[in-house]
Image (cartoon, grey):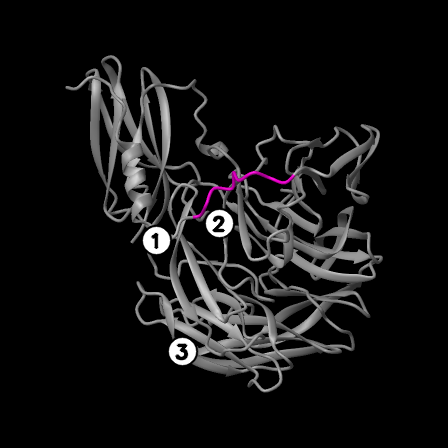
Amino acid sequence: MRACAALPGAAILLAVLAAATVLLPSASASAPPSTWHVTGDDRSWSLWEGDELRWQGTGPLPAIGAASPVMPGRDRPDTLELIASWQCPGNIDTGGGLHAWDLNANGVTDLVYSNWRYTTYAYEAIGDNLFQQVHQVANPVGSYYTTLVCAGDGDSDGRAELVYSSGTSGVPRNLYILESRRPDSYPDSLCAVVPEVNIGVNHMRAGDLDGDGLREYIGSTQGTHDRSVAIWECRGDNSYAQVYSVHFGPGYSVSGEIAVGDFDRDGRGDLVVPEIDGARIIHVIESTGNDQYQEVWSEVVPTENMFWVTPGPDLDRDGLRDFVVEGGSGIGQVIWSIIMYEETGPNAYAPVWSQQVIGGWINGGLATGDADGDGWNELLVQVGGLTQLYSAVADNDLELTWSLAGPLIGQGEHRIIAPDLDGDLMGEAIWWTTENPGTLVLYERIGLPPALVDESPATSLLLTCSPALSRGVVSLRYCLSRPSRARLDAFDVLGRRVACLLDAEQGAGEHAFAWRTGTLPAGVYACRLSTGQGTETRRVIVAR
């Protein structure tokens, strides 16, 4: 038995890095001098960028760093850190946003987006906070207004689809769908062209609103003095038909999203649509039967313009469904209102929480997801100059737990809280930056999620798992400084033990164990080593 020594985990990682064709550069590059400053005290303070007022609040003052302010709440588990960034060739798309889907059925979620040069890119994790480009395909129609609006599997045939919308003069107004030729390949084959309505879809969701077992693509369209919503339902392999559409107007839509879910828990699918400019009304449309829908609720929002809506679906953890809208009032320095609506009964909703933020006119947006790995969704809010994270502190009450202002702020409608791209059990908050258009930034909580946190002090076990992304066998290596009983357990992302790999007395020195993952579903797992010296936990992605 060899004595304890540095294990070759670093060498393995370097080999992986050398083999990667495209790696995300670290975001540790030097930042420009800060122009941010704070006035006031903990009773009432203002955050300024140069001469422009960016945010107002009470309580602990923001800390001004070299690049951007750090808002109060950095010691909370919700705190996020920059883990990766990269430049998208050809700048960003004008619509459609970011999408997360396992395009080649290997158990690893891909980050997908398209650019101004009519090309779609997919990136995939090759380790913790490490990514590489895995797919590139030309958009099906070479037009500025041909936009990637959805990634999914609408016909449920096990092959991923990329859905594009075209909507400008001289280009047929259609949905174009690229599909994988095999479940384990990437979408590159045009499989369907579906007629659209109106000018063109700019936001799309997937679901089964009418509960008939057939998947649907639900899209919102926009155009001059026009806004509509349409639903296309699967009619067979690579076949779709429009089953519903509704027109909202007049009113000019410059942006906006839709939310899909069952927000009153009555077993019927709901579609939340913000009618922006002009009317400023939230509409809830509900399924009333097979391919049948009707509006069941609406309310005027007290803002001059309404842009964004996102499902909670239970942000304040009270067992009731909710959705959040964001709208702005004013010119230049805009007062943004973020309002959470919650179910109060069948087809009934009421505002239960709101927050006002001062920011620029553009670059607003909302997203929800579990960004810190605690099993509950957080609300990501973006306004001109700020990115903020809100978390529940009580029933119908959210609290600002993290915020970023300065160079790495969000741009347009391009943001997402991905489910966990790199397999470290943490969701990623991802968005485009405005300081360097075309650059994506990924923020993540540093450390393990609460379900898998080791409470014991640091040890010298030197546990390593390789490869970090496995399709068969994971090699576990560790070192004992003295004889001890060793136990190796595997857990899923919810902290449930899925296997006891080893439970035995072992001597001092280096040990190795081969974990065969062939019986486990694809996904993210954690390996925990428990000995008399303490415990250590590592993450593993099982792919197929």
* Amino acid at pointer 2: Pro
Is 408 on the left or on the right of 489, as rendered? right
The reply to whether residue 31 is in sight is yes
Is 116 located above or below residue 363 in the figure?
A: below
Which disc is residue 21 wearing?
A: 1
Q: Earlier in the sequence, mark 1 or mark 2?
A: 1
* Amino acid at pointer 1: Thr
Q: Earlier in the sequence, mark 3 or mark 2?
A: 3
Is 347 on the left or on the right of 23, as rendered? right
Find residue 155 and report its horizontal and vertical position in percent: 42, 72
Q: Residue at x 25, y 12 (%)?
A: 482
Which disc is residue 417 wearing?
A: none
Kindly state the secondary structure of the residue where label 3 is placed. strand
> Which quarter of the figure has residue 79?
top right
Which disc is residue 419 wearing?
A: 2
Question: Marks 3 and 2, Cα distance to the nearest angstrom?
Answer: 28 Å
Is 296 on the left or on the right of 156, as rendered? right
Q: Residue at x 26, y 31 (%)?
A: 8
